[in-house]
Amino acid sequence: NAGVTQTPKFQVLKTGQSMTLQCAQDMNHNSMYWYRQDPGMGLRLIYYSASEGTTDKGEVPNGYNVSRLNKREFSLRLESAAPSQTSVYFCASHGGQNFYGYTFGSGTRLTVV
Amino acid sequence: ILNVEQSPQSLHVQEGDSTNFTCSFPSSNFYALHWYRWETAKSPEALFVMTLNGDEKKKGRISATLNTKEGYSYLYIKGSQPEDSATYLCAQGGGDGLTFGKGTHLIIQP
């Protein structure tokens, strides 16, 4: 049971380049999320998708776009990367029941130079 | 945006000792309180989800309590072991995403 799979694990971009972070879950979860982790900060929500076909902004959406391609996949796109987007990105999913926590992917470490 | 605060920021504990740390959150519009364990180079793993005032959850040597009226939760570790070394995150929210605290970094010293 793979859970939540993120690709790539590491990426270095030049300022202005674009890229898409991929996330897929095999648990039939309705909700999916993208978070970023920066030193000295808690995990901060970028975007989320409560169900297939819907997406909503989180706390720090500027500079990002998302696509909920189907129930399994939720991608995060940086159209024009900036050094401020250097971070570790985590995808997570949730089945909707209150008694279960989120399942996180293993993270993508992104450096923008 | 909900403000979730955790204390202390870091904690050194002798192996075998018991310890606890705190998560505080706004008591209004409460939905659920989550605790996660996050080891270095891994992804956060859910420990507990609590929704009702007075909830107590236990998993082995780790337990948690919840007070939604005053807006705090405690995580307890009994008889700390080296494998308990990790960052412990709490978060509040629901289906529209969780707001996380900055975590308590726990180091167990042999």
Image (tube, coloured by chain):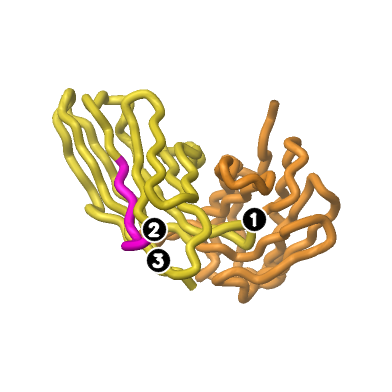
Tell me, yes or no, whether dots 1 and 3 are on the same chain: no
Residue A108 position within the rendered picture, expressed as x and y whole percent measured from the top left? 58, 48
x%, y% of residue B56? 38, 39
| Mark pair 2, 1: CA separation | 25 Å
| Chain letter for the residue marked with disc 1 in the picture | A
For residue B69, what is the image quadrant? Answer: bottom left
Closer-to-camera residue (A74/B100): B100
As for residue B70 lying within the magenta part, the answer is yes
Q: Residue B19, located in which quarter of the rendered image?
A: top left
Other-residue count near label 2 (Cα within 10 Å), few / some / many at <14 / 14–19 / ≥20? many
Residue B14 in picture, x, y percent from top left? 14, 30
Secondary structure of the residue carrying tag 3 is: loop
Q: Secondary structure at mark 2?
A: loop
Label 1 near label 2: C-beta < 8 Å? no
Q: What element does badge 1 sit on?
A: strand
Q: Which label was assigned to residue B68?
A: 2
Is B4 located above or below residue B42 in the figure?
below
Q: Chain of mark 3?
A: B
Disc 3 marks which amino acid? Answer: Ser
- Which tint is chain A? orange
Q: Which chain is yellow?
A: B
Amino acid tagged 1: Tyr
What's the CA distance linking mark 1 and mark 3? 24 Å
Magenta region: which residues?
B68-75
User: Residue A27 vs residue B37: left or right?
Assistant: right
**Residue bearing mark 1:** A33
- The chain containing the residue under callout 2 comes to B
User: What label does residue B27 carry, if any?
Assistant: 3
Q: Residue at x 44, y 60 (%)?
A: A38
Measuring 30% from the left and 33% from the top, which residue is drawn there?
Answer: B85
Residue B100 pos. (x, y %): 45, 58
Instruction: Give the position of the C terminus of chain B as an image quadrant.
Output: top left
